[in-house]
Each structure stands twice: as structure tokens, then as C-alpha cells.
Image (spheres, helix red, strand yellow):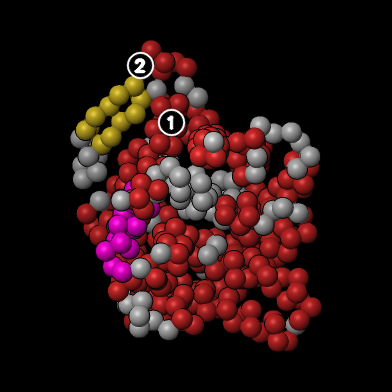
Amino acid sequence: MNNFKNGFIKENPVFCLFLGMCSSLALSTSLNNALGMGICVTLVLIFSNAIISAIRKITPDEIRIPVYIVIIATLVSVVELLVHAYLPALFDALGAFLSLIVVNCIILGRAEAFAKKNPILPSIIDGLGMGLGYTFALVVMSCIREFLTTAWVSLYNPFDMSQLIFRIGIPQLSDYTISLFGTSVGAFFTFACLAALFAFINSKEKKEAKK
Amino acid sequence: MKLLSMAIAAVLINNIVLAKFLGVCPFLGVSKNSKSAIGMGLAVIFVIFSASMLTYGVQYLILKPLGIEYMQLISFILIIAAFVQFVEMFMKKNMPGLYASLGVYLPLITTNCTVLYVAQDNISKGYNLIETIVNSIATPLGFLVVMYLFSCIRERLDYATTPKPFKGNPIGLIVAGLMALAFAGLAGIA
């Protein structure tokens, strides 16, 4: 349970450990993309952690990295083909970043740091926690950016992009939107402010723990 | 002329770090001083160019004739990982001087998403051999340029007074954002 909770704030893979930054900067333009990418990464992370932990006793130490990379690349290919077949709109939106999950440092990082020395069940939970932590980071960033660029935050049905699931916002503000936040500039600024906020929260907790 | 505008676009306008958000990890990690930034940039140019040539060959000589394009991702990442490992061993043995200056950055490049991205980009955009060569030199050149500029700013940033939570990476990201803003202005060249 503790592993699971750590992934959100204290050891949030994105804001505190600075892993998987490329995709979180690029795909946080809308809530739909953020959720879609988050779920894909979480799925790959759970399965890769489970498989790597299952074969941890028979993997020779010297060639473990190539073995992990083959496992991860296979899982990513599977996810990519599934998304391409069933969620074409999401596939177009994620673009190259879907196959770049392979080189997302979160996945190889968790394999090295956790799955290679722990049994299957804790590894799955760790994968789920870290994956949700990543999803959480993407969702927070995308909500801020989508709201600042359009004054709305909306979620569409990924199977049918014309179907709106929910939509909240402040229509009075729609004349005062900052379109800059939809571009790369806004991505860097949002990320920097959130990372500083997380550093602030963590340093405060540490101070309280010392007292 | 077309090739020239393609190269300028890849270096300045569609800059790989500031516009496409790739290679942000080494961008923040290895930019503490300008010397190591240049070393990393040169190593990246070399690896991306060679890896792109290799993957281009594999795609059109092996994967396509056999009709197994869905193996692209797996074969590309293995080629890149093996190639980087091989270059590292070769340099260590035969060019110790070059290894001492570039070698430390090599293992980091395997996890650099730019290499895989450029290899896939060449294929998905349907570039021919000459366009592939131009693209796979110009794109990492953009990385080198931005990396060098950023490291110079960062060296001075160490002496600035920043609010405590912003110290380190957050203020670096703010600087990157401002650089992205400046580079967005170059879009007019195209």
C-alpha cells in the first residue's frame, strides 16, 4: 500500500524524479491525450514489471538490459497495434510518442529499481502505482493547460470523438484565454511551476518530520 | 534548395528539444557546463547519423521485402542499443583519447528518445537516402545548438538568486520555456 501511495506525491515519477518528461511535456495539451497516454504507459508498466519479475531468477545479470528492452519493445508494439486498430483518433493524436514509450525512462527505471529483485505481486502493484502517478501528473498538467488555452476542460469518448462525456469551465473567461499555454512554451512553464510546487511540499514534509 | 530548407527547419524551427520535446532528460542532465554539453551534442550527432543509416538499411533491405514491418520497433531499438554498446567498446580500445572526452556520454544515449525518433521519422515520412542523411545530421545539430546555448545560460544561473523550490531543474525548465519562445520567433524564416 505504501509503494502505491508513494508514486503520487513523494516519489511522483514525473515531478520529483524527472522521469518520462518528454512525453509528459508533449502530450499534456488536452485531457483526452493525457488520459490515453497515461493508460497506455500504465498497461505497459504493469505487464513489463510482472514479466521481468517472473523471469528474474533465470535472467543472467550481464545481459539483463537487452532482455528488458526486448520485453518492453514487444509490449509497446502490442499496445501500439491495439490502439491503432480500436482508437484511431488517439493513435493520430499521440503520434510518435506511442512507440517512444519504449525509451520512456520510467519503465526501464522501475524494472531496474524494483521488478528485478521483488516477487510478482508487489511488482505489479508498484507498476500500477507508478503508472497512475504518471497518469496523475499528465492529467494535472493537461487540465491546467487546456483550461488556460480554451477556458474549458472537456473529455470525449475515445471510441467516438463526437461524443462528449463531460465538460466544465468558466465561459466568462473565454475572451481572456492564453493561447501560449497550448504551445511548447506553456508546457515548459507549467511543468516548472508544478515541479517547484512538489519540491516545496516535499521539503515542508521533511521539515515537519525533523521536528 | 529543398534540402537546405529542410535542414534549416530541422535545426531551428522544428527544434527537437524545444518544439518536439525530445531528449529533454539529457538536455537538463548534461548541461551543467558548456564543455560537456558540446561533448554530448557531438556524441549524439554521431550516434543518430550512424544509427539512422543502419535502421534505414534494415527497413528497406530486410523488413520490407519480408513484409514484417510490425517488427520495426523491436528491431530498431535492439540495433540502437547494440550499436551504442559496440561503439563504446571500440572507442575504449582503439581511440582512448576520444573515449575519454565522449565515452562517458555514450551509455546515456541509448535511453535518449531522439535516436529512436529520428530513425522512425525517416521511415514514416518516406525520405529517400539523401533526405535521410540530411535529416539525421540536421536534427541532432539542432540538439547541439540548443544544448550549448542552454548550458551557457545555466552556468550564469548558478550565481543568480532563485526562490528555493525553483532551484535546479524547475528554473532550468523556465529558461527552456523562454528559449522555446525565442525559437518560435524563428518560424518566420520558413
Q: Position of residue A41 (x, y in %)?
A: 35, 55
Tag 1 near tag 2, CB within 8 Å = no
Q: In which quarter of the image is residue B96?
A: bottom right
Near-viewer residue (A121 or A211): A211
Left or right placement of residue A140 versus residue A190 in this view: left
Whether B39 is drawn above or below B2: the answer is below
Please, what is the three-letter code of the amino acid marked with disc 2?
A: Pro
Is circle 1 on the same chain as circle 2?
A: yes
Please, what is the three-letter code of the amino acid marked with disc 1?
A: Ile
Q: Distance between the residues labelled 1 and 2?
A: 15 Å
Q: Residue A1 carries which label?
A: none
State the residue position of label 2. A171
Left or right placement of residue A35 versus residue A195 in this view: left
Residue at image point 70% right, 87% down = B93
Foreground disc of the pair 1, 2: 1
Q: Does the magenta stretch include residue B81?
A: no
- How would you rate the neighbour count of disc 1 (Cα within 10 Å): few for under 14, some for 14-19, many for 20 or more? many
Q: Is residue A100 visible?
A: no
Magenta highlight range: A119-133
In the rendered structure, the residue with mark 1 lies on which chain?
A
Residue sitting farthest toward the top:
A172
Q: What element carries label 1?
A: helix
State the residue position of label 1. A144
Q: Where is residue B173 in the image (x, y as percent from the top left)?
A: 61, 41
Residue sitting farthest toward the bottom:
B93
Residue at image point 51% right, 51% down = A17
Residue at image point 45% right, 27% down = A149
